[in-house]
Amino acid sequence: MKTIILLGGPGAGKGTIAEGIRTVSPFLHVSTGDMLREAVKNATGVGRQAEGYMKRGELVPDDVIVGIVEERLAQGSPDAAYMFDGFPRTLEQARLLDKTLEKHASRVNYVFLLEAGRDLLISRLTGRRVCRSCGQGYHVINIPPKRDGICDVCGGELYQRADDSEATILNRLDVYTKQTESLISYYEAKGVLVRVDSSRARQETVADVLRVAGSLVQP
Ligand code: AP5
């Protein structure tokens, strides 16, 4: 099993870069945010537990998150290459991931820290739109759809995420600083952290990540 992590604040481009990597490599994209939004949409037990935290821009409790990630890993093949987006987000989650990977005689191979300034993160999130049917992401200025409000891929309706209001975005940025930034030194100490400037065009960031991570999935 191979594992890479995309780490970065809200709007750093984790989902966008993961999508760019997924389409050109065998990495399996595991987004805890997407899994939770799906659970909320389907009103599952996990969805009911997570909904309030997500609306407020707070972190969902570690035990809920680790449960859904372990379930996802148990479904995959032992040779799979995973790309985590939005997980881990606390030291507790990082330590539990290490323990889970140890059981598979594996470890985290690389953590890519996507770095971009605070003003850029806010403008990316306020302008984000997502397709209600297929989940394709857009930005009203940076990555606009060909037709206003309509997905280029499937013709579905584009919507704004409930947690992309300005007040909730500011809370998510604070939560990142207080609860997630400590992962930078955790992974730096393990020698697996790679810093990437994600304020550039997405293709450049994708290329930087693949230059390092590509060797993990070469036949
Ligand atoms: P999650 O969905 O993970 O949200 P997030 O971390 O706040 O990150 P985002 O999805 O908002 O941003 P992103 O970095 O993926 O940026 P994107 O590529 O979309 O989590 C949501 C919630 O779920 C959390 O608040 C929490 O409640 C809960 N949760 C999830 N995981 C959890 C965990 N492990 N533990 C506890 N709770 C958890 O890009 C943003 C915009 O910018 C888009 O419009 C995009 O088109 C544009 N853009 C991106 N890159 C570029 C570029 N290079 N150039 C131009 N535009 C760009």
Image (cartoon, helix red, strand yellow):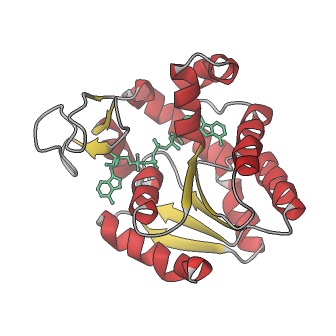
Quadrant of the snapshot with the C terminus? bottom right
Residue 174 on image: x %, y % = 56, 39
Q: How many callouts does the rendering have?
A: 0
Q: Residue furthest left?
A: 147
Who's the residue at 45% across and 28% down the image?
A: 163
* Residue placed most toward the observer, 163 or 159: 159
Residue 126 horizontal side relative to residue 48, left or right: left
138 over 20 or under it: above or below: above
Residue 2 horizontal side relative to residue 144, left or right: right
Residue 119 on image: x %, y % = 35, 49
Residue 32 horizontal side relative to residue 70, left or right: left
Quadrant of the snapshot with the N terminus? bottom right
40 over 170 or under it: above or below: above
The answer to whether residue 56 is visible is no
* Residue placed most toward the observer, 198 or 106: 106
Residue 193 on image: x %, y % = 64, 72
Q: Quadrant of residue 167?
A: top left
Who's the residue at 68% across and 44% down the image?
A: 179
47 over 131 or under it: above or below: above
Residue 100 on image: x %, y % = 84, 55
* Residue placed most toward the observer, 207 or 166: 207
Who's the residue at 66% across and 43% down the image?
A: 178
The answer to whether residue 22 is visible is yes
Q: Quadrant of residue 152?
A: top left
Who's the residue at 12% across and 34% down the image?
A: 148
